[in-house]
Every structure is written in C-alpha cells, then in structure tokens.
Image (cartoon, grey):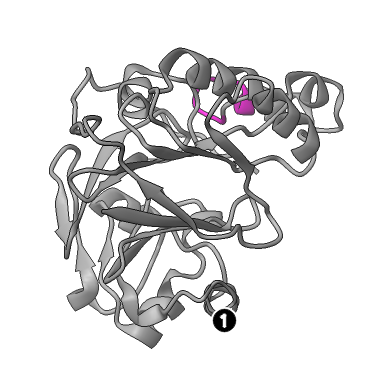
Amino acid sequence: MSLFIASLNSGSNGNCYYIGNDQEAILVDAGLPCKELELRMARLGLKMDMIRAVFISHEHTDHISGVPTLLKRYRIPVYITAPTLRNGKLRFDASLINHFAPYQPVVVGGLQVAAFPKYHDACDPHSFIVSDGKVNIGVFTDIGKPCDHVTSHFSKCHAAFLESNYDELMLSNGRYPWFLKNRITSGKGHLSNTQALQIFLQHRPSYMTHLLLSHLSKENNCPELVGNLFNRHAGATNVVVASRYCETPVYEIRAQEGLYSTAFVRPPAPVYSQLRLF
C-alpha cells in the first residue's frame, strides 16, 4: 500500500500540498490561483477529479487565496475551523463547508486526516497528519517553534513536509525591519533551518524515506544552503527542497513491514496569541 505526495508550491507566494492514494487525494491549503494549480497538477499527471477535500491550516493569504475559485469550479468540500473561516473572510457555498477539531480524524475515502494545534501567528492554526492506516504523511509548516505536538507526530511519519523557513545569519543581516525579524523569530512565526534540522536529527524515525523542506523564505534562505545542510545528515532519507516557483515530482511513499504505527497522539495543547507576518 502506498501514498503519493507532491508540493505544488511552497513559500510566501502560495502553498499547496497534494497527498493521495491511487483512488482519491486531498490538498492541504490552496494558496495558488486555480488555473495555476490545474496546470501544475496536469504536468504531474494528477487528476483534479481525484481531489476529494481541501484542508486549510490557517487564514493567511498564501494558504487560502485559491480556495474560493477552486471550490466554485469543482465543488470540492473544504475542511476548516470556524475561527479560520471567519478571520479569513472566505465566502463560498455553505454546503461545501465542514469543520474539523483537533485529534478527531476525518475520513476521506481510504484516507484519514487528523489535525493538531501549532504555534503560529494565526487565530486557530493547525498542522495535519494524513494516513491510510499504514503510511503516515505529515504537513508541518508555518510553525513558530518545535513543540511536543510537532515532534511527537514527526516521529511517526514515513514522509513529511517540514518548514525550514530562514537561515539565522541571513535574517539577522538582511534588509527586513527589526519588528518583522522579531516576529519571525518570536516563537509564533516560522522555523529556522537550525530548528528544522534539530527536529529531523532528534525525532526522525528510522523508516522515514522522504523529507520535503518547505516554506523557504525568498529573502532569508537559499535552497542550496539548506539542501546541503540536511543532506549531510540525511542517511537513507531522500531530502527534497520544495520550490516557491514550481511543483516537485510526485513521490510514492511505502511503509516498511513491521513499521506501521498510529500517528494520532495527543501532547499538551500550546497557548496561542495572534500576530501577522508580512
């Protein structure tokens, strides 16, 4: 049994992640224009009629801007929390709206999608684990710091999208104003390369086959820098740097015999406050 994954775009200009089996699939976030999403999926040989649901992590524009047109054109159900729907000011057919709650898996065909809270400067942010009962895929982006929620779920994943947003030196020496640098590093902004690497080194399971480094900053990171950093420690894990300009290939993720494990664990919930990154 396999799951297939791809990043359709990853960065502050738009985020969208594909996870599916050979019959159905879901998208996590839809921050691309619908036409561009269609083009990228077509180039990968992925069919829009396999998309059974869209799960929204939080209300920032780079995660939701393509949702209204996508839902209007394809009548795809959207799973979103009530605060995110309200703060995102999204408007679409109410019959397509479904709410999710942390640690209550949503069944989409042969897939189970479970959300869990995270630290980020949004009203009700969540990360996701997608599973077919044997293979676990994690989507861990837009995270302020590596709390127990993140690390415990990461340790159950056969593959993961993991944020590696900024290099500390590039951010410190870069042109961003002080208040924005402070927000990014505040614990409710984004993960640095160093923080992401620590998660990978300390919590990677032996059976993780693919790591897709995601949501890289255009100004404060470099794909070659972060790719080289992780590849020095990758071992048998295939490290891919997801682009902000194009889609990745589709990767087939299989579970190794004897290494099946549930991904739905529940550490203590973090406390949030809302900021806004520019």
Outermost front residue? 257
> Could you say which is closer to the camera, residue 180 or residue 100?
100
Image location of residue 240, percent across then percent down: 62, 43
Q: Quadrant of residue 90?
A: bottom left
> Could you say which is closer to the camera, residue 24 or residue 55?
24
**In this picture, residue 264 sits left or right of residue 271:** left
Image location of residue 95, percent across then percent down: 18, 77
- Amino acid type shown at disc 1: Lys
* Label 1 crowd (10 A; few <14 / some 14-19 / many >=20): few
Label 1: state its secondary structure.
helix
Residue drawn 60% across and 52% down? Answer: 10
| Residue 179 makes an appearance in the image | no
Residue drawn 61% across and 21% down? Answer: 185
Assess whether residue 256 is covered by the magenta stretch: no
Q: Quadrant of residue 126?
A: top left
**In this picture, residue 97 sits left or right of residue 22:** left
Residue drawn 34% across and 51% down? Answer: 84
Image location of residue 117, percent across then percent down: 30, 33
Image location of residue 106, percent across then percent down: 16, 53
> Could you say which is closer to the camera, residue 254 or residue 242?
254
Q: Which residue is mark 1?
A: 35
Q: Which residues are magenta?
A: 183-190
Outermost bottom residue? 73
**In this picture, residue 136 sits left or right of residue 234:** left
Compared to residue 123, the image places residue 52 above or below, namely below
Assess whether residue 189 is covered by the magenta stretch: yes
> Could you say which is closer to the camera, residue 99 or residue 131?
131
Compared to residue 81, the image places residue 53 above or below, namely below
Q: Report the magenta stretch's main SS.
A: loop
